[in-house]
Amino acid sequence: MSTASTSSSSKKHKVVIVGSGNWGSAIARIAGQNTQRHSDTFQREVQMYVFEEDYNGKPLSQVINETHENPKYLPGCKLPDNVIANPNPVDAVKDATLLVFVLPHQFIRSVCKQLKGHVNPDAHAISMIKGVEVKDGKISIFADVIQEALGVSCSALSGANIANEVAQDKFSETTIGHRPDAKGRENAELFFKLFDTPTFKVGIIEDVAGVSLCGALKNVVAIAAGFTDGLGWGDNAKAAVMRIGLMEMKRFSEEFFEGIKPETFTETSAGVADLITTCLGGRNRKCAEAFVKTGKPFDQLEKELLNGQKLQGTETAREVHELLAARGKVDDYPLFKAVYSIAYEGIDAHDLTSRL
Amino acid sequence: MSTASTSSSSKKHKVVIVGSGNWGSAIARIAGQNTQRHSDTFQREVQMYVFEEDYNGKPLSQVINETHENPKYLPGCKLPDNVIANPNPVDAVKDATLLVFVLPHQFIRSVCKQLKGHVNPDAHAISMIKGVEVKDGKISIFADVIQEALGVSCSALSGANIANEVAQDKFSETTIGHRPDAKGRENAELFFKLFDTPTFKVGIIEDVAGVSLCGALKNVVAIAAGFTDGLGWGDNAKAAVMRIGLMEMKRFSEEFFEGIKPETFTETSAGVADLITTCLGGRNRKCAEAFVKTGKPFDQLEKELLNGQKLQGTETAREVHELLAARGKVDDYPLFKAVYSIAYEGIDAHDLTSRL
């Protein structure tokens, strides 16, 4: 019995959450619950890499392990006691077979550099990073950056997932996009089991780039939606801008990536549903509304309204513009162009729809 | 010269708006502007059939013609002086070649009966009616009802079109769905010219049933969205319910109608955009929120909150349920089923998502 149990245990997947912000902590909570629920598939303990910082005179990782709560990024939400904060990324990923990347995108490359050579080559990875990387006229999604840097198959997860609502078990859906090969499918099924719960419903689609791009590009559309709110244009205009934006998101992705599925954009939680959530609430929408109403520049609003958090929509609009300019395609995406021109070139927000 | 001009004039289309409520008046305003703008295609005068009623001691049609405003249904909005109110439907449609049906759906059959034999057989018609007719286990759209009753080709128009916003020239899009034949295409192009403006942008798709069904079924989804608002479930849950609802709308339409285009639902203003507008504001959403918060039945809320207007979402949910029950398909549409069960069978709204 004991041998069988050990042998079975050695096949169980070990989970590490690489990141511990608001969304990382919310997803660590679910992973910690589900490794217990599916104890035939997963080892109980979930490692969570915490970028160390001071919290009221103590290291944040120590506070998390003592209180089973991340008081800095997800206050008021208990983490299961099998989620273990670890400030050392190399130590956190040791022997892990499931790697969940949920870091701000500016840290991805440096963390991957640290992890290189320390990751189980058979590990499965998933990226929950919202954003794209544009360099030298080329655009990359972070699932590709991670896959190439670490040599592991990497899926992507995105959806209408406001972290605090997920942490409170309010009903949500999400979408996993996976690679077209067998490993990609296996990946998606493992992460499905790790994350799916009665109030956090996971869908699967064979489209890692589409899911990733939905998560990045929706923020550009949310800026446009925020402009319509600031202008007091009403629900018809806002819905029109969201629809036009969704169509540009899809077309842009089909133009610059292989194997994009249109229904990722129009039918999944990562697509249409996340666009709705982001354009209803969300920091991009909020700052864009304030931009129109106050006339203050975005970097000032970021400081005043976001408590130091970065605004992703304007940054992505800039990156998308840089790519489109390099390819001579700026005019093919009038909504993206209008957002860039209003945010960065001083064009009046009232011109938004006259350019569509 | 004079002969040529007369001959050219005799080919110009004569427009009649059959209906003069809130939306009918808003669309009559646009039609009145565009017949003047495109004087090569349309006769200047636009007839508007007004169901006669008393307004402060005067017939409403007389008030409209004296003040160029419909003070009962679209107060504060000037109509162009070439829009002529006419309380006699047979007289209004005389020699008309473009018929715009924009009546509450309970009046369609009786008005068509009055008009039968009085309509130009070469006329083009368009239905702006939101709703479906379910009878003896069969479902019909009103564009088909009109086409069969009057023997004229009938398209459909629907979109994210809150009437008061359209009347104020706030930016909106809309969608015309037309028949697959040459007459259908010609129809769509004429109505495009009659309605398209810089702030009311018309799209065209070859799918008259899809456009009609979007306009009817979105109201059922808005009831579900209103339930989530009433329950305080947050934006993730609301977006999830909207996404699931949109997928059921599409699947239902594909199951019961021929020639449905999926992109009508996922890419047009009639589909995804109108769903968004309706679930953001809208009377169905509002009453469903109040239903959960107050526990009052829908017929009471209708009286208290809608000033005598009918709630379309609960009525359409009932009709859809009747059809699905007759076909043994109720369980294939869990969101539609949940809306029906909560609205009509006393099921607790908290059960909404556990049934999806």
Image (cartoon, coloured by chain):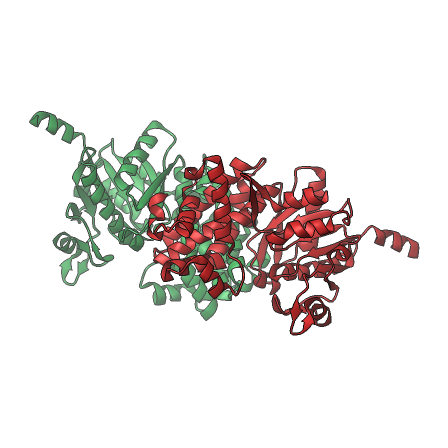
Chain colours: A red, B green
**Left or right of B48 on screen, residue B136:** right
Which of the 4 image quadrants contains residue A55?
bottom right
Instruction: Identify the residue at image location x=75%, y=64%.
Output: A82
Horizontal placement of A332 versus B8: left or right? right
Q: Is residue B262 visible?
A: no
| x and y percentages locating residue B123 in the rendered image | 25, 34
Q: What is the x, y in percent for residue A117?
A: 77, 47
Write the residue at 67% across / 74% down: A57
Q: From what the image shows, is residue B106 above or below residue B182? A: below
Q: Nearer the viewer, residue B5 or A119?
A: A119
Pick the residue in front: B53 or A126. Answer: A126
Residue extending farthest to the left is B2
Quarter occupied by the C terminus of chain A: top left
Q: Quadrant of residue A151?
A: top right
Q: Position of residue A290 (x, y in %)?
A: 41, 61
Residue A221 versus residue B205 in the image, above or below: below
Q: Nearer the viewer, residue A341 or A354?
A: A341
Compared across the picture, whether A210 is left or right of A292 comes to: right
The residue lying toward the viewer, choosing from B273 and A140, is: A140
Give the farthest residue toward the front.
Answer: A136
